Amino acid sequence: MTLIEGHPPQVVWLKIPNRSRAAVLNILLEHRMEIELALLQENRACVELSARNNSVR
């Protein structure tokens, strides 16, 4: 199926309270290396950023 329709999209799921665009950008930039590692090297379909403990899963 993926040969016909392509690879499914990869998702960065922000599990954080409502924030400004600048705050969201800062969170993404702070975790850029972890996000890239998970999506590109570990080939994960979804990466979750949690505000609870400021972690990446």
Image (cartoon, rainbow, N blue to C red):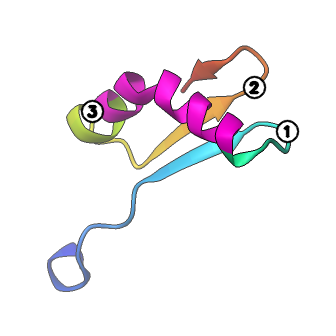
For label 2, the crowd category at 10 Å Cα-Cα, with few meaning under 14, some 14 to 19 and many 20 or more, is few
Viewer-nearest residue: 46 or 31: 31
Query: Is residue 29 in the magenta section?
Result: yes
Left-right relation of 26 to 29: right
If the image is split into quadrants, where does the N terminus sit? Answer: bottom left
Q: Is residue 34 left or right of residue 19?
A: left
Residue 11, image x, y percentages:
48, 53
Indicate the amino acid at tag 2: Ala
Residue at 61% across, 18% down: 55
Determine crowd level at label 1: few under 14, some 14-19, many 20+ residues with C-alpha closer than 10 A: few
**SS for dot 3:** loop
In this figure, which residue is indicated by the disc labeled 3? 42
Image quarter of residue 57: top right
Magenta stretch bounds: 22-37
Which quarter of the picture shows residue 6? bottom left
Identify the residue at horizontal 60%, vertical 46% (top origin). 13
User: Which callout, 3 or 2, points at the residue further toward the start of the chain?
Assistant: 3
Residues at circles 3 and 2 in contact by the CB criterion of under 8 Å: no
Q: Residues within 10 Å of mark 3 (few under 14, many from 20)?
A: few
Observer-nearest residue: 23 or 53?
Answer: 23
Position of residue 23 measured from the top left corner of the image (x, y, whole percent): 70, 35
Q: Which residue is denoted by mark 2 in the rendering?
A: 51
Separation (CA) of disc 3 from disc 1: 27 Å
Mark in front: 3 vs 2: 2
